[in-house]
Image (tube, helix red, strand yellow):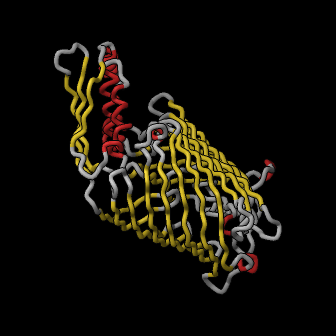
Amino acid sequence: MSSRNEGLRERLGSYKAYVSKVTINGLERTKDDYVHNILKDCFEITNVRDLVEKVKDVRETLLQIGAFKEIKAKIDVTPNTKYGYIVDFYGVEQSRIKGNISTEMNQYEMVSKAEILLPNLFGRGESLSFDYAYSNSDNSRRNLGFNVKLLKPFLHRKYIGKYRPQTFLHLFDNTSKSYNNSYNNHTAGGTLNLVFNTSNHLQHTLQYELSFRELAGINRQVPLFVRQHFGPRLASIVRYIMKYDDRTDRIFPRSGTMLWTTLESSIFRKVGDIHYMSITSHLERNLPLFWNMSLQMTARGGFMRELSPEKPIPINSLFTMGGPYSLRGFEFGGVGPQIEGHAPGTHMFWATGLHLWAPLPYSSYFYRFARFFRTHLFFNCGNVDSNLDTMRSAAGIGLAVALAQFVRIELNFTRPIHRQKGDQVAKDVSFCLGLDFI
């Protein structure tokens, strides 16, 4: 922030203010109590600076609750008062039915999706959506899926509304192919989810999944150790997902921390054929440096164990390591011993990364264009067990591009430094896209 803007903020902070009245116009299907807990935050101000920032935050929140497609805000003085203000919001509600065709980004690939959405069904943010998704990425996977999602928020509740809780039922029927291990995975079932926030940056998800999973071969040249996992299974899994994110930017953050952790377990032993527990975590820390450079430190790890010796963990649930999302310089699933060219999977893994990010040379002369590009030097290391003597590592240099603020595209030159017998090394020059890299 410039010194001029900082000085303006300080001056606005010296002017006393309070909000005497808040109104919202344009409510038709939306119930008054659904927006009440959000609007009352406007009263928690003591000066003009807080007033402006709070109104901005409330407007953004109103746009996120699934009821409005447009919100405008107006601040005016209260007549016959010295410090009083009136805040008026003007909203345009969502139409009763929406449809769109879009491209989204998950962790590993671009997903093309056609969706039909029924928003704000009963006036309190309820929604029903149907979507068909397809992806065909270069990481040897192909996915095809149909999803139905019924969402119910609870922002209107007096005591729990501040945590922005919502529940949703997600029904799915997905098919994915793993060409690395020559299997086809069909999954059909549903999840029941409870999502809530305990701060502006911390979100929690409790999830129960009941699904039917079936593995089958995609060709006749499938190794025996992969065939042993073929057949139908019933999965009954409980998950807890925690995510903390206060980064300044999703794609090229200069500062901030992002942490997510997933715990899952088949705690209902009498329900389902898959019995295991696992934990996976990812940490990213960004530190600003001089000359618009930044230092990024990343770490990711996972561990799982069987809960029933007579029921081994299916191969599609095991960890694999290799590639830019776990360890650069190696093929997807290429770290560790291979059996007939296939990755058997592992019960644990860990990986760390160190990146030095810098803008393009002479970027100050074409900032509007150059701000979407960054260069980086990086070093990665990791392993599929806890033995440091067999640790793999790689280093390289690359160019990254931010595409529409929802995906990062990287072109890297990478050379492995330490590798072991049986590892599959990737080509020196690689192209990839994703969200959370190591």
**Residue projecting furthest to the right:** 309
**Residue projecting furthest to the left:** 79
Image point 21% across, 32% down: which residue? 74
Image point 31% across, 47% down: which residue? 31
Can I make out residue 335 in this image? no
Q: Nearer the viewer, residue 141 or 374?
A: 141
Location of residue 95 by image quarter = bottom left
Position in image of residue 378 (x %, y %): 58, 45
Q: Is residue 170 left or right of residue 323?
A: left
**Residue projecting furthest to the bottom:** 220
Q: Nearer the viewer, residue 180 or 54?
A: 54
Q: Is residue 328 left or right of residue 19?
A: right
Image point 27% across, 31% down: which residue? 22
Q: Nearer the viewer, residue 397 or 284?
A: 284
Q: Nearer the viewer, residue 64 or 177?
A: 64
Position in image of residue 82 (x %, y %): 22, 13
Position in image of residue 248 (x %, y %): 45, 36
Position in image of residue 161 (x %, y %): 45, 40
Please give the count of numbered marks on the rendered protein.
0
Image point 50% across, 34% down: which residue? 255
Q: Is residue 81 left or right of residue 299?
A: left
- Residue 67 position (above or below residue 25): below
Location of residue 243 by image quarter = top right
Can I make out residue 403 in this image? yes
Quarter of the N terminus within the rendering = top left
Location of residue 325 by image quarter = bottom right
- Residue 426 position (above or below residue 15): below
- Residue 402 position (above or below residue 190): above
Q: Is residue 349 left or right of residue 298?
A: right
